[in-house]
Amino acid sequence: MKHTLYAFVALFAAVQAGAETLVLPEPTSDRFCQVVQKILSNTELDSYNIVFPVMDDYRASKPSPRPLLTYQVVQYDGQMPIMVSCKVKGAAHIREFKGEDTAGEQLFCPTITRMIQARAVGELEQEGLAEAAANAAAFVIDDNEPHPTGQQYLSDFELSYIGDDGAVHINTPSLFHDFDSWTSWILPRRIEGQLYCHLATADYMKSLAKGDIQPGTLMTTADDAPTVPQ
């Protein structure tokens, strides 16, 4: 068990170095996707982040590079936030509108999920739940290939599942369009340079690790998705 946690600490240190040690706010904070924007595009710019209380508004939203607008929605299981969805801008699109020095290396959604996993492990350790902490550290964060279309990103999916390897896997579905790609010449401007993420929360991972919930939570972006505490 200790070897698993030591290996996880080393992995987390590497993730944090790549993310410049920015700390994620609580998933219900109106700054959450603002910080996700900073981490994934390696930018110091503050976005104006809008949190939607209903899924329909989130589905229709499109982030903007000028002004820098990002969007967020949270889904709940009862009172517990279990997933945060963010729509942010890619680094190349920020550089195009804000200047070459305003954004750096492009990172992707699993980077954020691994940071959330590290928080879950740390909180379980602080609570004295060593076995649950080891369970959470052993979760496999899938490096899902980003979807090319919004329809795919908004489709139903399992937030967690048991893989063929017997481990608990955490999905991180996303959408990405590289503004530097030749496809920017043919795409409508409103969908250029977008980066969207679905992100499991630390509370969700902790509940999985403790056995309070079982893998296989089905997520949807339908109108009746629970976007407020129940």
Image: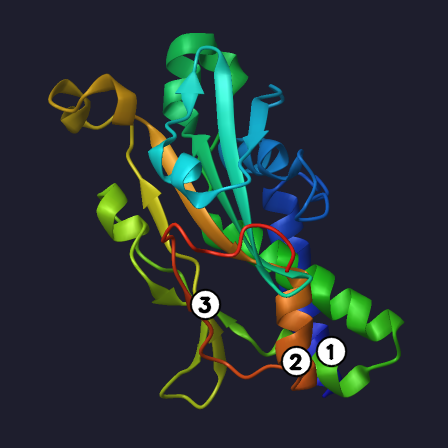
The image position of residue 112, as x and y in percent, is: 56, 50
What's the residue type where badge 2 is placed?
Answer: Ala
Evaluate if marks 2 and 3 touch, with contact meaning CB atoms under 8 Å apart.
Answer: no
What residue is drawn where x is 45% and y is 67%? 159
What residue is drawn where x is 44% and y is 44%? 55
Q: Name the residue under label 2.
A: 209
Whether residue 108 is visible here, answered yes or no, is no
Q: Which of marks 1 and 3 is in front?
A: 3
Along the line of sight, the residue nearer the viewer: 51 or 98: 51
On the rendered structure, is 162 left or right of 204?
left
Whether residue 141 is visible here, answered yes or no, is yes
Evaluate if marks 1 and 2 touch, with contact meaning CB atoms under 8 Å apart.
Answer: yes
Q: Mark 1 points at which residue?
A: 133
> Of helix, strand and loop, which one carries label 1?
helix
Which numbered disc, 1 or 2, marks the residue that appears first in the sequence? 1
What's the residue type where badge 1 is placed?
Answer: Ala
Sort mark 3 into few (<14), some (14-19) or many (20+) by Cα contacts within 10 Å: many
Along the line of sight, the residue nearer the viewer: 87 or 134: 87
Cα distance in 3D space between marks 1 and 3: 19 Å
Cα distance in 3D space between marks 1 and 2: 7 Å
Marking on residue 228:
none
The image position of residue 28, as x and y in percent, is: 68, 46
The image position of residue 17, as x and y in percent, is: 65, 45
